[in-house]
Amino acid sequence: MTNVPTNAGSAEVTALDSQARGPLLLLLGSGLVWLVVSGFLALITSIQLHSPQFMADCSWFTFGRTQALRDTAFIYGWGGNAGLGIALWILGRLGGYPLRGLNWSVVGTLFWNLGIAAGMAGIASGDMTGFSFLQLPRYVLPLLVVAYAAIAMSGVLAWSGRRTDGMYASQWYAVAALFLFPWLLCAAQAVLLWWPVRGTVQAVAASWYGQAVWTLWLAPVALAAAYYIVPKVVGRVLPSYESAPLGFWTLIFVGSWTGGRHLIGGPVPAWIPTMAVVSASLLIFHYLVLILNFRVAFQTGGTAIRFIRFGLIAYMLAGLAELLTSFRGVALHTQFTFFSTAIEQLGLYGGVSMMFFGAIYYLVPRLTGNAWASAGLVSGHRVLMVVGIVLSIVTLAYAGIVQGAGLLDDKTTFATIFGQIRMTLVVNSAAQLILVTGNVLLLVNLVRSACPFTNERPATSIFRQPSKLEAHAS
C-alpha cells in the first residue's frame, strides 16, 4: 500500500476532514512556510561557520541572531504549527465527532504566526533572550500562550467529548503535548524572564526547558502520528500494544530530566548531571517499547511509512546518543562541540520532522480528497531529506570529534582546529542546501494539492478502512 495513490479515490475522506479542511491546511501550510524560512536561516549560519565574512556587515544576520532566528522559526513556526495540525486531526479522528471551535483555531493560528513574526523581528533587531529555544522577546510570549490555547481548544473538546471511554495511544501522546507545552512555556517565562531566579538556577531552568520542548512537546506529537498511522497502513493492531502505556509514562516522567547533561562540569550540584544519566538510562525502556510496537513498520512500504520509519530510527538513535554523552568521560570530548549540534539535528530533524512529514503525507489526501499533485515531488522530497539529514549529521559529528580532540590538546590552537574541520563545515552547508530544497518541493506540492484550481477533485473520493485498524483502546 502506498500513500501516493494514482487516483484520488484512494483517499479516505470523512465528514470531519471536510469540515476541518481549511483550519488544518492553514496550520500545515504555515508550518511548512516557517520550515523553509528556518532552512534558509540554517544555510546562512552554516556558511558563516566556515566563512565568517558572509553577511558580516548586516547586523540583522550576524551569527548569533541568525541562529536564534533559525531555532525560533523551526521550533515554534514549523514544530508548533505542524504539530498542532497533526494533533488536532488525530484527536478529531479518534474522538468520533467533527472538530468544534475551529473558528477559534483559525484566529489562534493567525495570532500564533503573528507573534512568531513579531518575535523574529525583535530578535533580528537585537531584542532577544540568551536562553536556548527561548530567544523570543518576553513581550511576545504571553501572546503565544493565548494563541496556543485558542488553537488547542478544538483538540481538547474532541478529546473530552470522545465517544469511547478508553483512550488510544495516539490520544495519550497528543493530549499530553497539548497540555504540557503551555505549562512548560509559562513556567520558563516565570523563572527566566518575568521573575528570574538567580545564579546557577537559571542554567538549570534553561536546560530543563530546552530539553522538555522536544521530549515533552514535539516528540509526543510525532509519536502520536506514528501510533495512529502505522497500524492503519500495515492493516493490523500493533504487537505488544499492551506495553505502550509504560513507554508513554516513562517518557512523560523522566524525559525532561535528561537536560542536566548540558551542565556537566558547570557550577551546579553534582546530582543534576547524575540525574541526567539516570533519566537517559530509564528512557531505554521507552525506546524498547517503541521497538516492540513498531517493528511491523519494517514489513511494509508506502510514503508515510518510509518517513515515519526513518524518524523512529533517528529518534531512538538520538536518545542513545544523549545517554552516551551524559557520561562525564564522554562529555569531556563532546561537550561544547559540533557533536552536540549533530545530536540536536538527529533528534529534531531526523526524528521529529521526518515523522511529521510522514503524517502530512498521510493526512493531506484525506483532508483534500485529492492525491498529491506530483508523485515526483514526493519522491524527490524523500530522497533529499534522507541525503541531507544523513550528510549533515555525519559531517557535524565528525567535526565535533575532531574539535573535541583539539580542544583537549593544549598545544593545538583554535586556528588549527578550524583548518581541520573547515571542509567538513563546507559539506554541512551543502547538506543544508539540500534540506531547504527538499522542503521547498514539499511546500510547492502542498499548495498544488490543496488548491482547487490546480488539482481537480474526482467524482468518487471516499475510501473507508475497517474500524479494527484503529487498534483497541485502553
Image: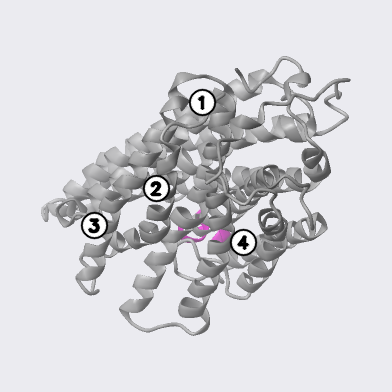
User: Mark 2 and mark 1 in contact (Cβ < 8 Å)?
Assistant: no
The residue where tag 2 is placed is: 247
Q: Earlier in the sequence, mark 3 or mark 4?
A: 4
The residue where tag 4 is placed is: 120
Q: Nearer the viewer, residue 235 or 23?
A: 235
Q: Is residue 43 visible?
A: no
| Closer to the eye: label 1 or 2 | 2
Is 63 magenta? The answer is yes
Tag 1: Cα neighbours inside 10 Å, few (<14), some, or many (≥20)? many
Q: Nearer the viewer, residue 188 or 54?
A: 188
In the image, 249: left or right of 61?
Answer: left
Q: Is residue 269 visible?
A: yes
Tag 4: Cα neighbours inside 10 Å, few (<14), some, or many (≥20)? many
Span highlighted in magenta in the image: 55-66
| Closer to the eye: label 2 or 3 | 2
User: Mark 4 and mark 3 in contact (Cβ < 8 Å)?
Assistant: no
- The mark found on residue 306 in the picture is 1
Image coordinates of residue 316 in percent, x first then y, are 36, 40
Q: Secondary structure at mark 4?
A: helix
Image coordinates of residue 109 in percent, x first then y, are 73, 57
Q: Earlier in the sequence, mark 1 or mark 2?
A: 2
From this view, report whether residue 327 is shown above or below residue 238.
below
- Separation of disc 2 and disc 3 at Cα? 18 Å
